[in-house]
Structures are given as structure tokens and as C-alpha cells.
Amino acid sequence: MHLFTMFLSAILINNIVLSKFLGMCPFMGVSTRLENAIGMGVAVIFVIFGASILSWCLYYFLLVPLHLEYMELICFILLIAAFVQFVEMFVKKNSPTLYKQLGIYLPLITTNCAVLYVAQDNITQGYNLIETIVNSIAVPAGFMMMLCIFACIRERLQGNDVPKAFEGNPIAFIIAAIMAVAFTSLSGLV
Amino acid sequence: MSETTRKENFFTRLLTDNPVFGLYLGICSTLAITTNINNAIGMGVAVTVVLTLSNILVSAVRDITPDDIHIPVYIVIIATLVTIVGMLMQAYTPSLYSALGAFIDLIVVNCIILGRAEAFASMNPIGPSAKDGLLMGISYTVSLIAMSLVRQILGTGILSFSNPFTNQEIFALRLIPKGFEIPMFSSQVGAFLTFACLAAAIAAYKNSLAAKEKAKTKGAK
């Protein structure tokens, strides 16, 4: 039950995009079409899941025994960069069609602050391995959900008559504000 | 370069090439920490320091960095600097450190820093790189202050600033009478709304500049 609550609150209440403002760059950049949004979402789920578990293991099996906790940031960001690179190479070799779909999003993920945040959050919250796994599936799932909803709205927006100054990104932020209003009302859920 | 064009350059840099509202870089931290001016200035200074130093270091090692691994090298340089800045802030400005929270570590993935390292510092000598980093950092700080001014005044009605080292309040000014403030602006919703309006204002300014330019070329014909 505790894990389920954690899962739900990570997706709906503490949604990483609307309440923590993380991963805004890809959120604005690739949310113009639903197809791209799904591709990016899947890639982010996979990378966050893998990178968080690896960095959890790295922290507790290597950094803590060696008393190198202060190296956390440097180690995690290197691990994430290496992991993304590795995934890119692996996908490229084994599934060219998937690579074509995800290819352009993978390098972007290294600089997605959500990845680093989840990896660090698992440590600062003192999660054990199971909680880490749940958390690192739930957070990117919430990210993907927001990305897809947002992409659908923006697709509809394309034919609309928007004031000239608000064209493009500013109107997208207005939509995000309205969505944030909607999602704050869910906060009593858990 | 004469003094006037340099000044003009600086202001165009600040307004039209603004990294936050013009290029949409480093949005995450802009939205998250601009609830009051203290946080905005603290974050702005931290980013400016990291950006300037990382530009200097990246430009210093630009000739000996192998091309294939230049991104990991830059990331390690930036992460080291961020760790140092984070430790200094934890030691000397503990309240600011806890207010900014995870966002200090997340300076590493602030797109402005890696973006400038990649686009400018990796190709230019140390002097110009340092200047570029400083300028970019200042315009980032200005954007943060602009955001936080709107949000703090509308959200709490009070404009206040306190010394980050001693936590002493330097001044506090009530601009909106009690009961008339709009608390929404302190929350996430206000962050998005403020950002949208400021970005739209910059876009409108750019449009008007473009229109003027057009009219000028037409007049010349």
C-alpha cells in the first residue's frame, strides 16, 4: 500500500513537470506532436529507470564504503552520460527501427534535469532498492503522461488564432499554467 | 568598438538574446526558485560564477580535449565547479542553500552552461570566453530577478531582501495592502503565468524591432 501511494503521488500530485518544474526543456521542445511525445516519454522512462538503479548501487556499494559521498554529483552525472551513450549504441546496433524513432531524443536526455534529480532524490530520501525502483518508474511515467496530454493540446492549438506575441512557447506556458491549476486540485487525493 | 555600440550590444544581448526568455534555456530553475528575490539573486550569482569559471576552464583545455569525448570532459569540469560552489554555499549561506535545495546540484544540467561551453568557449580564447560567461550569467540573473519581482510583489505583497550571510533583513516594503495580494503567484501556476507574460513581452519587443527594420528597408527603397 505504501508503495502504491508513493507511485500515485509521484504521478499525479508531485508531478515532476508541473510541481517540480523539471524536464522543462524537452517538455517544451518535443511536445508539438503526439508521436514525438510518446517517443521521448518511452526513452525517458527507460533512461531514468536504468540510471537511477545504477546510481543507487554505485552510491551504496562504492561511494559509501569508500566515504566518498561528496563525489555523488560528479559520479552520477558521469554515470548518466555514460548510460545514455551506452543505450544509444546498444539500440543503434540491435534495433535500427527503434533507433530511428528514438535516436534524436537520446542525446537530449543527458541534459534532462529530471534524470539527475530522480537519481539524487532516491538517495536524499533514503529509499531502499524496491522504493527506488518504484519511484524511478513512477516519476518518468508522470512525465510521459504530461508530455502526451500537452502534445494533444498543442496539436489542437496549431490552427488557432493566438495573439502574435504569444505565438509558440508563451502560449504553451499559459496552457501549462492552466494544467497546473487542474492538477493542484488533485493534491487531496493521497 | 566604440562605447555606444558596446552598450547597445549589451542591451540587445539582455533583451533579444536573453538566454531564458529568448532562447528558452535553463527554464527549470527559473520557474522553480523565483518565489523571492533572495533566492533569485543567490541562484543567479551561483550560476554566473559557475558559468564564468567553466567557460575559462573549457577554453583553457580546448586544444587538448579529444573531440570524441568533449561532452564528458565538459560535464566533469562543470560538475566539479558546481560541487565546489554548493559546498561554499552550504558553509557560508546555509539558509539560501536549504531554500534552493536540489536546484544547486541541478546547475550541472542547466542547458545554458553546457550550451555556452559547447557553442562559445570550446572555440574561443580564454579572455572572450570569460567575458561571454559573465555576460550570459548577468542576463540570466536579470531574468531571474525580473521573474521574482513580479512573483514576490503580487504573491506576498511585500518586497524584501535579507543578507544571505547573516539572515538579517535589510529592508521589507509592503507594496500591496494586506488581504489584496494574490497568493497564486507564489505557487506553480503563477510561475508559468509570469513566465508566459514576460516571454510574450520580449517577443512583442522583438516583433516591433523587426517591423521597424522592415519599414526602414522599405523607406530606403
Image (cartoon, coloured by chain):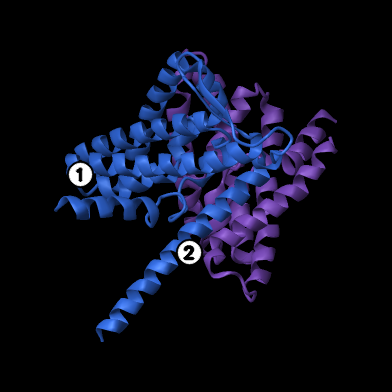
Chain colours: A purple, B blue
Compared to residue A50, the image places residue B209 above or below, namely below
Q: Residues within 10 Å of mark 1 (few under 14, many from 20)?
A: some
* Residue furthest bottom in the image: B221
| Any part of residue A140 in sight | no
User: Mark 1 falls on what kind of element?
Assistant: helix
**Could you tell me which residue is drawn at 63 percent across and 35 percent down?**
B157
Chain bearing mark 1:
B
Compared to residue A179, the image places residue A135 above or below, namely above
In the rendered image, residue A155, in percent from the top left (x then y), is placed at: 65, 69
**Could you tell me which residue is drawn at 17 percent across and 50 percent down?**
B3
In the image, taking residue B139 as reference, residue A76 lies left or right, namely right
User: What mark, if any, has residue B175 been given in the picture?
Assistant: none
Amino acid beneath label 1? Pro
Compared to residue A173, the image places residue B54 above or below, namely above
Q: Residues within 10 Å of mark 2 (few under 14, many from 20)?
A: some
**Could you tell me which residue is drawn at 52 percent across and 16 percent down?**
A64
| Any part of residue A84 in sight | yes
C-alpha distance separating marks 2 and 1: 31 Å
Q: Which residue is mark 2?
A: B204
- Tell me the quarter of the picture where residue A153 sits: bottom right
Chain bearing mark 2:
B
Q: Are marks 2 and 1 in contact (CB under 8 Å)?
A: no
Q: Which residue is mark 1?
A: B128
Indicate which disc, 2 or 1, sits on the residue closer to the N terminus: 1
In the rendered image, residue A150, in percent from the top left (x then y), is placed at: 67, 59
Mark nearest the camera among 2 and 1 is 2
- Tell me the quarter of the picture where residue B129 sits: top left
Residue placed most toward the observer, B21 or A10: B21
Amino acid beneath label 2? Ala
